[in-house]
Image: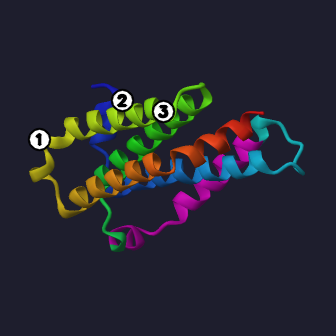
Amino acid sequence: MNIFDELINLDETLQIRIIFLLIIFVAIYAILRQMKMLQWSNSIKGIISLVIAIVAARSISETAIQNMGISSKFLGIFLIYIAIMLVITYLIHRKNTTSLIRKFLIILFAGSFAFVFYDQYYNLSEQGKLMNWILAGLTLLLIFFDNSIHKWVRYKKN
């Protein structure tokens, strides 16, 4: 049995805690990296972020997780899509590509992601169907604000 089988067989609340841990860690680390007044190394910022994330994920009660009504599969797929889309968006905006090519690449990725989950659309819960529409909306926002995102990424590069 490998580690992925162990992760799949975890309790639902533990899976949600792990996902929240990752979200909080990334958010805190990104905030600490942007703070110019802190002259700490990246490893110290990473350790501080991890400690805050562990405390936050540990302090979430099980009743709060159950009251959220969010499944771990919903959060997992949503985070995978967001992470991949952010990486793709960042990479295509760092290159000198035209707006048409950038939009085509975003549509190509979103289309391939939708194609993978298309056959399971009717097997999904209401949350899963809502997630598909949210991801489609985020893709449309990326396409609509392509030029603004490109200007921001190009500005941050220089």
Rendering quarter of residue 71: bottom left
Name which of mark 2 and mark 1 comes first in the sequence.
2
Range covered by the magenta-colored residues:
45-66
Give the structural element (helix, strand or loop) at label 2: helix
Q: Distance of mark 2 from mark 3, alpha carbons?
A: 27 Å
The one nearer the camera, 125 or 10, is 125
Give the structural element (helix, strand or loop) at label 1: loop
Q: Is residue 129 above or below residue 48?
A: below
Q: Residue at x 44, y 33 (%)?
A: 100
Quadrant housing the C terminus: top right
Q: Amino acid at mark 2?
A: Ile
The one nearer the camera, 33 or 145, is 145
Within 10 angstroms of label 3, few (less than 14), some, or many (20 or more) residues?
A: some
Q: Residue at x 21, y 35 (%)?
A: 116
Residue that mark 2 sits on:
3
Q: Is residue 138 above or below residue 103?
A: below
Q: Position of residue 56 (x, y in %)?
A: 58, 61
Q: Is residue 48 magenta?
A: yes
- Which label lies toward us, 2 or 3? 3
User: Would residue 31 appear left or right of 109 to someone viewing this image?
Assistant: right
Residue that mark 1 sits on:
119
The one nearer the camera, 86 or 33, is 86
The one nearer the camera, 156 or 24, is 156
Q: Amino acid at mark 3?
A: Ile
- On residue 1, the disc is none
Q: Position of residue 6 (x, y in %)?
A: 31, 36
Quadrant housing the N terminus: top left
Residue that mark 3 sits on:
88
Within 10 angstroms of label 1, few (less than 14), some, or many (20 or more) residues?
A: few
Q: Amino acid at mark 1?
A: Asp
Q: Residue at x 39, y 67 (%)?
A: 65
Q: Position of residue 108 (x, y in %)?
A: 33, 32
